[in-house]
Amino acid sequence: MKVCFVGIGSIAKRHIRNLQQICDELKIQLTIDALRRQNSSPLQDIQYISNVFTTIEELPDDYDVIFLTNPTEYHADTLISLHDHAKHFFIEKPVTSIDTIDKLQEIKLRDDSIYYVACPLRYTNVIQYLKKTIDPQKVNSVRSISSSYLPDWRPGTDYRNTYSAHKDLGGGVAIDLIHEWDYLSFLFGMPTEVKSFIGKVSDLEIDSDDYAIYIARYADNMIAELHLDYFGRKTIRTIEIYTDEDTIVGDLVAGEVRYLKANKIVDLKSDRDDFQKRELMFFIDAINGKEDVQNDIEEAVRVLKLTQGIIE
């Protein structure tokens, strides 16, 4: 399998390491190239990259997969520019920025190609457990929160210099934490109505939004609340599910599901890379025709618009 990563940030490095391990286990011969800016820092900590290119003109046109792991704002333009250089595409979330959604319409998608948009939290043990055990028809209400401190996200990196801090690079908590809307749509489908409050209230030195709060209603009378922020000093990532029988808390940080009335805890702890390896394995199966892709560009655009309170 011959692949190319566009942009080598923290998520790309994790994907590269995990992909190499998976291919070693499956005995798949893997060649990894990279396309990155000429003035980027040296790749001293990446041992698996064969070739580094700095212009599209240098890039071969026979890749099996191109991974778009560059800043969100550039996803649409990159996909357009590199569409003829690979058979399949793995696009890091979000699929693109709100301002560049229309550019995706310029791409003539191929029927025999996979365009997969990352949705890693779907593959966590907690969300997988809830998907298998919770009947959406029996849920009255859902409350989801992702609260964390942006300066702690990337140790050793000044948060003010990251894409998250800058709206023009596709940053902002509503887009950055699109994972929550993604797993809510995975578990319960799309809401019929949504109200949102998005803005900035903290002292963080950023020009992007640091909070996004939503209230949504579903056709079967279920309601949902979602809170996202960049300023929570203690990381919280939970989903509370209210049914007639119990209140169920899925805790993605602790790796457990708690039944509050029944006083039961389901331990689902796993290593940090496990769910992302599971996602990469799904993607490999998809490009080999063994799995049907649900989170394609069309689905990812619907979820992206939902972060802005737009329902289609």
Image: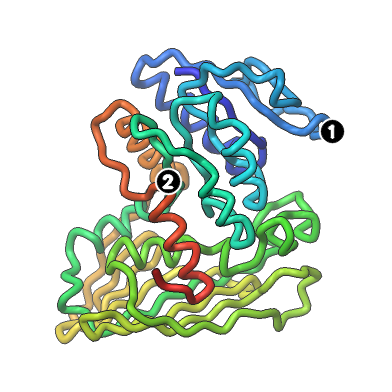
> Which residue is pictured at 61% across the width and 75% down the height?
232
Q: Position of residue 122 (x, y in %)?
A: 36, 54
Q: Which residue is mark 1?
A: 39
Quadrant of residue 41 in the image? top right
Mark nearer the viewer, 2 or 1: 1
Is 300 in front, or is 181? 300
- The amino acid sitting under disc 2 is Asp
Is 178 in front, or is 17? 178
The vertical placement of 70 against 18, above or below, is below
Residue 72 appears left or right of 192: right
Q: Position of residue 93 (x, y in %)?
A: 52, 51
Q: Which residue is mark 2?
A: 271
Q: Position of residue 73 (x, y in %)?
A: 66, 52
Quadrant housing the C terminus: bottom left
> Which residue is pictured at 44% across the width and 55% down the height?
300
The vertical placement of 83 against 306, above or below, is above
* Earlier-in-chain disc, 2 versus 1: 1
The vertical placement of 156 against 45, above or below, is below
Could you say which disc has been placed on residue 283 in the image? Answer: none
Instruction: Tell me the SS state at disc 2.
Output: loop
- The amino acid sitting under disc 1 is Asn
Asked whether disc 2 touches disc 1, contact meaning CB atoms under 8 Å apart, the reply is no
Q: Position of residue 277 (x, y in %)?
A: 41, 38
> Which residue is pictured at 56% across the width and 21% down the height?
32
Q: How many marks?
A: 2
